[in-house]
Every structure is written in structure tokens, then in C-alpha cells.
Amino acid sequence: MTNILYVAILCAGFAAVTAYYRPNLPPGPYCGIGNRCCTGRQDHCSARILDTVCYCDDFCDRGARDDCCPDYIEVCKRPPKPIIACIEGNKYYQPGQKIKRDCHECVCEKYPNMDVAYFKCDNDPCIMSEQVYRGVSSDRSTWRAYRNYTQFYGKKLKDGLIYMLGTLPLNNEVEAISVPSKSELNYPLHFDARDHWPGFISPIVNQEWCGSDWAITVATVASDRFAIQSNGAEKVVLSPQIQLSCNKEQNGCQGGYIDKAWNFARLYGLVDEECLPYKANVTKCRFNKKDDLIGDGCRPVVDARTSRYRVGPLYRIKNEADIMYEITNSGPVHAVMTVYQDFFHYRDGIYRRSRHGDNIMRGLHSVRIIGWGEDFGDKYWIVANSWGCDWGENGYFRIARGHNQVGIESFVVASWSEVTEAYKRT
């Protein structure tokens, strides 16, 4: 009788336990309430079911699942949700987060209907391009490319053509400026204004991330000519900052027109770098148009000067021979060239456009031609850039001469500096 009673109780208990898995049980949740899943054996890790309890700890799952709650497997043993993230450099990024790869902005995005994420990057070309470097290197060209100028890293080409150049398109009126012809027939094979007028030629400027090439070229050409045309008496480094801050007809670091820049130097006048240092941005103009250097708080390089440093009317120089004549007789000149992606990579040698890289995007750039030369019969101009001394040949570059390479001989201009009367060169 006792054995019969024991078997009956055991069967009833088994029926109660197996009832945990019958489809007609209350829907729950059980373990799903507050995420009750527990490790090991924890008797409090339970939930009410009918008139008894079921468990949500590891101990309940002993093979037969004899006292686990009905949702134990689904809630406590299901695989964790996959991590939907992008990975970059051992770091996880959630959808919507952004990173930069060189100049590219990349956004972490989730694939539709998939638990996978990826970085979607823009395809704007960067200034620095491995394709350009390898292409120029394999060409055995007359110039060499550099793989990665740090000042250009992380910069887009479309932005570089604004902020590392700055010369705005020439209008028809500017292109029609008078073109005097004074060329002679015989010139030396080599001429460098730095050697011909030692100490008179202004140093290389770094325009930084500001489209001020137009202002820098006007200031440096005028500086050179003040020193040359005064026999060194008015040796001054003029500041391009006055154009950025005070020339309201220009667009500051967004670019400027060379005729308006030279006209400003003629009517308003320039000041020296010590009086107004270059800041590579637009600052408040602290000068009045009618003031002189004394009123500006500037210190003239000669006692006889009180007016700002002004220049005469702009004139155009039309061909290779005239450019050479102008440089040897009056000093460096202002040239405008077209810049493509490959030019940013220039390291040394005689530059010729390679056509590697992007050949659609381009911009106009003001530079200062200071001389010329020949290398085994290969003629070139010596040109000062405005990207600092770490670029190119200590801030300079050489470019093929006599072939109007990238338009450098198409639009060349200059202006006489208004030197103090007592120091004019005779």
C-alpha cells in the first residue's frame, strides 16, 4: 500500500512538472520578467506558475528540464543579439557614427535587413594620391613627385583648389591690359634674381589653409621691386594681410582678383610685415584709407618715407623673351598658372603636367617668376610658390619654359614700385 501511494505521488509530481511545457499553460512570461536568468543554483531565481514555482537558474537545466520555467530556453539560453557595429582600428562604431580615412568622411551604416554594418565613405579625391605618385614615378619624367606632404594630409582636392590657391578667374578687361614689348635678343642661359640681387628677394611665404596666393604674390613682387628699384635702400617685406583685412572688393581666404589686388596696392598702399603680420585669415582692418605709415603706427625703412608702399599701373608682359627682359631689368613678375592634382605632389625637377590623377578639377594660382635656366638644353622658369619651404625645392619649383606649360606664360603682369624719390635707381 505504501509503495502504491509513493508511485501515485511521484506520478502527480511528474505531471505537474511536465505541465510546465504544455501549450495550455498561462502565456507568461516567467524568466522573461525582469531578465531573471541566474547562474548556478539559486532557489530565489524562480517564478510562480499555477500553484507552484518554476526556476530560471542553471541548476534547473539538468537534462530533463524538470523544474525550469517554460520560457527558460528562449529567454536564458538564446544566443546574444549580434553586435551591429563597424570596426576600425580595433574600435567599434555604432550606426550613425563617423570617422575620417585620409580626407574621406565615412559613416557607419547598417545593411538593410541584415545584422551587419559597414563604413560608407564619400568618394571625393584627396589632394595627395598614391596613383599620382606612382604614375609620375613610373614615367621617368623630368620631375619627381612626393608621396605625402603632411600639410595636405586629410584635405580634399576640391578644397585645396580653393584654400591652397585663391586666384579667381580673369575677366576680359583684365586680359586686355596693355602689352608693351621691350625684348632683346640675347639673354644668359641662367638668371636667378636671388643671385643677381643678393638679399633683395623676399622669402618664401606659407599661405597655409587660406586662398591668398593673389595677395601674397602682389606683396612679394612689390617687395622685390622696392628693394631693386631703390638699390636696396627700401628693402622691405610687405604684408599680404592688409589685402585680406582691408580690401573689401575681394573674398578673403575664398580668393581674390589680381587686378583688384594690384589696384588696391596702387591706390590704398601696402604696409610691412612687421607692422601687420600675416595671419592666414581675415581680421579687422585697423587702417584708414587716407592715413600714412606714421598714422598706421608703422615704422618706415627710410626716414624720407611717410606714405604707404604704393605701386604704379599694372602692365602685362606677353611672351618668353619679354618676361626675361622684365625680370633682368625690373625684378620678379606675377604669373598665373593652372593647377591640377599632380602639381601638389611636386618635389623637384622641371615640372610638366603629367595627366595622372584628376584631370577635371583645377584652379588658377598666382606665383612669382624670379629667373630661368637650362638643364641639358631643357629650358625652365624658376618660380616662387606660397606653400612654405617644406614644399618643392625649398618652396620654389622649376617649370618648362617656352611652351606655356599649364598657361604660366599666358598672363604675366608687373608694376613699378613707387620708390622714395631720393632713392630711385637711375
Image (cartoon, helix red, strand yellow):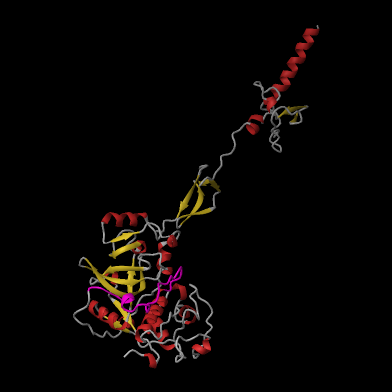
Residue 52 placement (x, y as % from top left): 77, 26
Report the front residue among 41 and 351: 351
Extreme right residue here?
Answer: 2
> Residue 206 vs residue 332: left or right?
right
Residue 175 placement (x, y as % from top left): 31, 80
Q: Residue at x 30, y 55 (%)?
A: 137
Extreme top residue here?
Answer: 1
Report the front residue among 12 and 287: 287
Say whether residue 257 is visible.
Answer: no
Q: Residue at x 22, y 78 (%)?
A: 187
In the depicted structure, whether residue 311 falls above or below residue 152 = below
> Residue 38 vs residue 315: left or right?
right
Say whether residue 114 is visible.
Answer: yes
Q: Residue at x 26, y 78 (%)?
A: 324
Task: Tell me the quadrant of the picture where the C terminus can be found.
Answer: bottom left
Disc count in the image?
0
In the depicted structure, whether residue 75 falls above or below residue 166 = above
In the depicted structure, whether residue 295 falls above or below residue 398 = below
Task: Tell me the quadrant of the picture where the N terminus can be found.
Answer: top right
Q: Which residues are magenta?
A: 189-212
Residue 209 placement (x, y as % from top left): 46, 68
Report the front residue among 204 and 156: 204
Magenta stretch, overall SS: loop
Extreme left residue here?
Answer: 185
Residue 312 placement (x, y as % from top left): 36, 88
